[in-house]
Image (cartoon, rainbow, N blue to C red):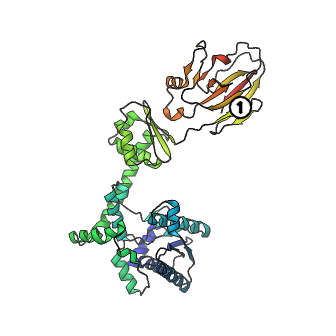
Amino acid sequence: MVLIRVKENIEKFSLQPQDKVLLAISGGVDSMVLVDVFRRLNLNIGIAHCNFSLRGEESDKDEELVIAYAKRHNTPIHHIRFDTKKEANRLKLSTQLTARKLRYNWFSEIKEKHNYTYLATAHHLDDQLETFIFNLSRGTGISGLRAMLPLNNGLIRPLLNVSKDEVYAYAKKESINWREDKSNTKDKYSRNYIRHQITPKLKELNPNLLNTFNTTISRLLATENIYKKAIQKDISKLFDGNQISILELGKHIEPLQLLYEILKLYHFSYADCQAIYSKLSEPKGQLFYSKSHQVNIDRTHLYLSKKTIKQDWEIPLNLSEEKTNLPNGKMIHVTKIDRPNSFKTEKNTLYLSLENTNINVRIWKEGDKIKPFGMHGQQKKVSDILIDAKVPQTYKKDVLVLLSNCEIIWVVGHCSSESVRITDRKISVNCIKLV
């Protein structure tokens, strides 16, 4: 039954004859059954084994079993040892998370180096149920409830609809050697607690639990597929990769859920989205951060951008150089114009007489002031200029200023100073442009 089920699953993955599959083999019964089934199906495989050095001699015996199996069946073998506890201390992560990070990073390296098409793991139906319960206990949506996917970005799980009891039955029937991890008998870890304490109680309520659960997972996966297609249409109407219309968001049947579907790809949690949504009717200008991005609530839109730390830099602008690269990735372009009859007004262009030579450029700061052109020497805060121009909070952080002898002469793209007004059209000037 297991052999037939796995063969059917592999056919759904559309593996080609030339595809190579890297099998993650620990030495436990699940993975030893997986490699035996793949070998019997005459698939092109290799074995990868990680010794995490967490159980002393027991870990070494697991490694010996896997290597011996590979040699006996002439199967390519890749194996590695990790000092997992040392790495956990360095990364400041739990032992479990560190082991997961180490093995999947290494699997990726092996796949790329040896041209494996897929990585296969031995997760089975009982693992799927544990994942479902674990996600449910923490709080989740549809994707969390449908748990692990059979095929996901080059990772395949051919045993995902096979129960643990079926795995054991196959192993005994085919006389497969495996090793038991004694740590699996302890309730220290959440999954073990679910396995030993919760699942048996559920099976008392429903002796046919795994079969009905497998049907539920199929239905949840189908529901998720329908949901994704529908939500993507809504997102394409509302979000252009940079901004979200607050008005259009409010018209949606589930605005908070739609907001989460947009922002989760930028590492915003559901709780983050709840906080953002709760502030839409309050004063604007509030910022919310994920680990990689930020959202600014403006008057009519939510603006999304990469999270940046305001840079504290100031550099001289060499007017004899045609181009000056700035630390923020922008560039200043300088062109000398001889005796222009008129000046073409452009947003990111300043015309400066040649007598102005000591010029610096930096990002504006709170408290900066300028004497705007036309205000007869009166000063105005740069922050007020940006407010008047209705510059979104997200973009304010990147506004540049030019200074001459410590006096701001240009808020780039917005306002030039009275002090650099050109009254003689017959003189030569520098045309300074931000590109």
Across and down, in percent, residue 73 comes to 53, 84
Q: Residue at x 63, y 36 (%)?
A: 313
Across and down, in percent, residue 377 comes to 61, 14
* Quadrant the C terminus occupies: top right
Regarding residue 15, the answer to whether it shows in the image is: no
Q: Which residue is mark 1?
A: 317
Across and down, in percent, residue 152 comes to 46, 62
Q: Residue at x 49, y 61 (%)?
A: 153
Q: Out of 14 and 89, give the one closest to the viewer.
A: 89
Across and down, in percent, residue 88 comes to 50, 64
Above or below for 165 versus 293: below
Regarding residue 319, the answer to whether it shows in the image is: yes
Q: Residue at x 52, y 65 (%)?
A: 87
Q: Is residue 355 left or right of residue 224?
A: right
Q: Residues within 10 Å of mark 1 (few under 14, many from 20)?
A: many
Q: Secondary structure at mark 1?
A: loop
Above or below for 158 versus 285: below
Q: Is residue 237 left or right of residue 312?
A: left
Q: Out of 104 and 377, give the one closest to the viewer.
A: 377
Examine the image and state in which quarter residue 79 appears: bottom right
Q: Out of 353 and 186, give the one closest to the viewer.
A: 186
* Quadrant the N terminus occupies: bottom left
Q: Is residue 288 left or right of residue 187?
A: right
Amino acid at dot 1: Leu
Q: Residue at x 40, y 83 (%)?
A: 171
Examine the image and state in which quarter residue 252 appears: top left
The residue furthest left is 205
Above or below for 10 versus 232: below
